[in-house]
Amino acid sequence: MSSLKPTIDDYLKVFKDYSNSFLSDNIDDNLNVNIKLKRDHSLRVFENAEAIAKSLNLNEKDLFITQLCGLFHDIGRFEQFTKYKTFRDEDSLYHGALGEEILKKEKFIVTESLDIQNIVCDAVYNHGLIAIERKNTISLLFSKITRDADKIDIFRIVAKYYRKSGPRNIALEYGLKDIPIISDSVITKFKTKELINKQELHTLNDFKTMQLAWIFDLNFPYTKEKIIEQGYLNSILDSINAVDQREILRDLVFVSENELR
Ligand SMILES: [Fe+2]
C-alpha cells in the first residue's frame, strides 16, 4: 500500500492476499474448498453492497464505507475454519466477533478515520447475528446494507447448491441430517414471520426453512427484487423433502413475495 490514502483497489488486494494466505498446498481439499468459498463470497458481498449503496444514491464516502463493510464482513471466517474446521459458530465462536478482532489485530483499516473504523467494526460484528445488536446511529445503515448484501449471496450459494445433485459439502449443510422432517417449532416460527435461531435446528429442512425466513428480515427494495428475480426462494423450496410442510411453506412464501413487491 502506498503512503497515499488507500483506495478500494488497495483494500481488495489486502483482502485477497490475506484470504489466499489460508490456502494450503497439501491435499486437504476440504480446507481449500471452504477458504475459496468464503473468499469468493466476500468479493460478491462487496459487489452486492456496492449495488445496494448505489440503489440508495449514497455519496462517494458512504459508498466507500459500504464497500469496506462488504469486503471485510466475513474476515473472521478464514481463521475460524482453519482452527475449528467448521463454519458453525455454536461449535467454535461467533465469526463476527472474531472478524472485528482480526480487523483490529491485522490493522487492515487503521489509516481510515476512527469513525470509519468504528462503522466497519459494527457492521462486521452485526452482520451474522439473528438481529442487529449494535444500533449506533452512525453505523446502523451500514450494518443493514451488509446484512442484506450477505443474504443475497447466501441465497445464491445455497440455491445453486440445492439445485445440483453433485458431492455434498457438510460445511454448507451445517452438518444437519437430511431427513424429511421440519421441526414443529421451526414451522410455527415461520408462520408468525419470526426469525429462526441456529440453535433450534434439528434437520437440514429446518436449516432451509431458517434460510427462507430471512425474507422477513430484508431491509432494502434492491435486495427483495434481486432475490425474487433470481428465483432463489423456489430453488430452496423445491429442495425441501418434507412434502406436506414444504407446500405450506410455499404458500406462505408466495404471500410474502407479493407483499415484498
Ligand atoms: Fe457472509
Image (spheres, helix red, strand yellow):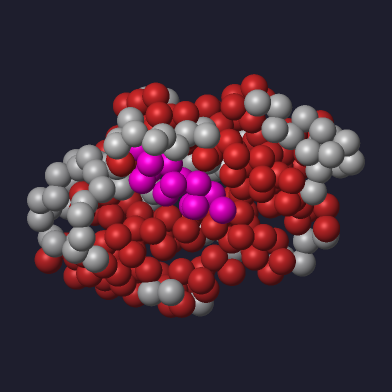
Image coordinates for residue 237, horizontal then vertical, percent: 26, 67
Which quadrant: the N terminus? top right
- In front here: 111 or 32? 32
Q: Nearer the viewer, residue 223 or 254?
A: 223
Residue drawn at point x = 66 percent, y = 34 percent: 121
Residue 242 image-quadrant placement: bottom left
Where's residue 224, x and y in %?
51, 68
Q: Is residue 176 magenta?
A: no
Q: Residue furthest front?
A: 25
User: What residue appears at the point 46 percent right and 69 percent down from the top-left corner?
Assistant: 227
Question: For the view shown, which residue lies furthest in the right direction?
Answer: 4
Up-down relation of residue 83 to residue 19 (above or below): above
Query: Residue sitting at 66 percent across and 40 percent down?
Result: 14
Q: Is residue 107 left or right of residue 234?
A: right
The residue at the point 39 percent across, 36 percent down is: 25
Q: Quadrant of residue 57?
A: bottom right
Q: Position of residue 114 (x, y in %)?
A: 81, 31
Magenta stretch, residue numbers? 31-43
Is residue 128 at least partly visible in the picture?
yes
The chief SS type of the magenta part is helix
